[in-house]
Amino acid sequence: MSTDRQSGRQLVALKNQIVSGFNDSHWRELGMLTETFDMVTRHPRLLRSLSWGDPDYEGNVLEMIKSIIDADPDNYALLLDFVARTCPEGGEFVSSTDDGARRIVFSASVFKVPGEKPNINLVSVMMPFDGAMKPVYTTIKAATAATGYDCKRADDIWDDSTVIQDVFSLIFQSYIVICDFTDKNPMCFTRLESHTHWVNT
């Protein structure tokens, strides 16, 4: 998250996905995965407001996901991955029934297929948004610019209200995808599953 405004937009996008797709068990599972189980279950309003459909639930969700990330910044990647796998509706979705068109088959119908065609000058970077990784991204951007490519990361876009849709759109439109597997970031692995052209750096 490179700026406070971007951080806020990401948290709101995650909150919206969680509100539409989480149940009590999902919260408990997330708590176990991020080692914040006590924080989740002992929150005075989170699970209660979910159970009763109270109007303060959305605010409690926002507060909780911020607390989970504040407890350990590495929880952000775990949170993104868990929400992406948990919230989509089940079933298979095929992007096109036209035999002559490009087709993408999803195991869950969460993504909108971008209308733009792939850009042969676009390089996308899948990596942790951690501030400590900024020099790496800056170096990659400089190298791609020197060779005539445009380089972007998901937090450079903010076209959609859901973070994962921006990630998918960027991968879909990119000619090259560079992935940094530092700390075995689960979101980097998740993003690779959607693309066939990638470079391991």
Image (cartoon, grey):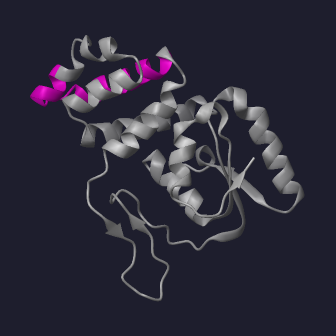
Could you tell me which residue is drawn at 36 percent across and 82 percent down?
A: 97
Image x and y of residue 137, in percent: 75, 41
From the viewer's perspective, is 7 left or right of 65? right
Instruction: Please say whether residue 31 is one of the residues in the magenta stretch.
Output: no
Which residue is situated farthest in the right direction here? 146
Could you tell me which residue is drawn at 59 percent across and 64 percent down?
A: 196
Q: Which residue is nearer to you in this view: 25 or 168?
A: 25
In the rendered image, is residue 29 in sight?
Answer: yes
**Marker count (numbered):** 0
Which residue is situated farthest in the bottom direction here? 100
From the viewer's perspective, is 119 left or right of 95? right
Dividing the picture into quadrants, the one containing residue 155 is: top right
In the rendered image, is residue 159 in sight?
Answer: no
Dividing the picture into quadrants, the one containing residue 175 is: bottom right
In which quadrant is the N terminus drawn? top right
From the viewer's perspective, is 190 left or right of 124? left
Which SS does the magenta portion mostly show?
A: helix
Q: In this view, does 34 lie above or below 10?
A: above
Q: Is residue 145 above or below residue 70?
A: below
Image x and y of residue 118, in percent: 62, 71
Could you tell me which residue is drawn at 23 percent across and 27 percent down?
A: 57
Q: What stretch is highlighted in magenta?
A: 48-70
Could you tell me which residue is drawn at 79 percent across and 40 percent down?
A: 138
Q: In this view, does 57 lie above or below 155?
A: above
Instruction: Please say whether residue 56 is one of the residues in the magenta stretch.
Output: yes
Image x and y of residue 36, in percent: 37, 16
